[in-house]
Image (cartoon, helix red, strand yellow):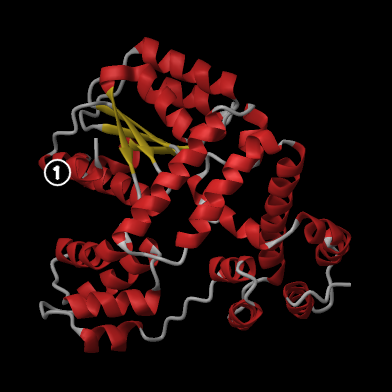
Amino acid sequence: MDLTTFEKLLKTGKVSNPVLVFAGPEDFLKEKAFADMVQKLVPEVDRQDNTVRTGSTAKELPGVVQQIFSFTFNSSPRLFLFQEIDSAPAKQRKDFLEKLSNGGIPADTYIIFNVTDAKIAGEITAKFKQQSDRIDFWAPFANQLGAWIRNQTSEQGAEMSSEAADQLIELVGSDLAMLHQELSKLAVSSRGKKIGLAEVKAGVAYLRQNNVFDFLEAFGQRNPTKALRCLETMLNSGEAAQKIWFMLCRQLRDFRLLHALMRDRPDLFEPVFALLRRYSLLAGKSDFKSNQEKKNLLSEIQQLADSMPETLAKAAALRQPGKLRNLYLALNFSYAELTAVAREIIDNDLAFKSGIADAGASLQRFTASFLTGKTN
């Protein structure tokens, strides 16, 4: 089922299948879809009792199974959201799904799985067959983002011009959660008037992106000027240098591992690198054709992952769309330089964890020296 069909069914309150698999990479849209389900299907007086969010640990799953099959005098629909089922061990996950499918889903009960791994999403829908629907959540293409903003604004009882929507994207960026947050504020303050350029500039111009993801992208693109500017903005706004350092280390480890796998198993990873090279040529483009081609390339990489040993595919994050979209940045680095800087990363990591005097300055020095090729 596509997202548009699901939204139409939800508006009529006719979500027929009790098991829904929210797949794809766009977590904000998944969260919004669940919130819309709660609002549409469960009366406000029963929402606290009838809405359950849970992880997928060995301790949590048995208790939730009992809760799903427990008797209740409450006649309103009950919604159970499982947020990390794809991170559970395979045996634990399969045992849980087996118990759930054998027991039969009680009437007026919806089981929603928030899944990133496409293979596990298929595993769940295959298990429940005609009782399940899979909805893939993808961010709108760049040329459709303005229409998405206007539609979301309309749902909140307001109207926004095309020019204002474009201005909002320019000021906020393409992050859907941020866009929805800001358009919601504008919708509330519009008081029935159409939201134009002036309203957007006055209400949103204070925003600057320069978040940790912008920093990681700039670092991956080997753009020291942009990376240091992002870093300065974050540090000045109170962002913890330790948190930024942790995410940077994780990115560099992922890049090094990918290159190491390429050296050890070129038979498996040369095709992956070839697709990443093609993706890198399109990474900066946002027209419809380029976006479709990028989506196809990611799908090809995921298909290659299905033919690999599970340990290698998982280690390289080849089935995680969020990471996979940025994996092409590893091409901007060599195995030799990532290996050469490993000792410095370890030393810095120990310093950060032990309480370095000026963590921000240390992070800036590392960023500048690494991206300009002047590492110790």
Q: In the image, what residue occupies the spot 52% across and 23% down? A: 93
Dividing the picture into quadrants, the one containing residue 53 is top left
Q: How many marks?
A: 1
Q: In the image, what residue occupies the spot 33% across and 74% down? A: 169
Residue 156 screen position, x and y as percent: 18, 64
Closest to the observer, 322 or 27: 322
Relative to 353, does residue 261 appear above or below in the rendering?
Answer: above
Residue 170 screen position, x and y as percent: 35, 78
Residue 196 screen position, x and y as percent: 18, 83
Dividing the picture into quadrants, the one containing residue 4 is top left
Badge 1: how crowded within 10 Å, few (<14), some, or many (20+)? few
Farthest top residue in view = 102
> On the picture, is 346 further left or further right than 57?
right
> On the picture, is 304 further left or further right than 264?
left
Q: Secondary structure at mark 1?
A: helix
Closest to the observer, 43 or 310: 310
> On the picture, is 152 further left or further right than 83?
left
Q: Which residue is mark 1?
A: 8
Dividing the picture into quadrants, the one containing residue 82 is top left
Q: Amino acid at mark 1?
A: Lys
Instruction: Please state, as top left, top right, bottom left or bottom right, where the C terminus lies in the image.
Output: bottom right
Instruction: Please state, as top left, top right, bottom left or bottom right, where the N terminus lies in the image.
Output: top left
Q: In the image, what residue occupies the spot 53% across and 76% down? A: 210
Can residue 69 be seen here? The reply is: no
Can residue 371 be seen here? The reply is: yes
Q: In the image, what residue occupies the spot 30% across and 89% down? A: 202
Residue 246 screen position, x and y as percent: 70, 60
Closest to the observer, 339 or 271: 271
Relative to 196, does residue 11 appear above or below in the rendering?
Answer: above
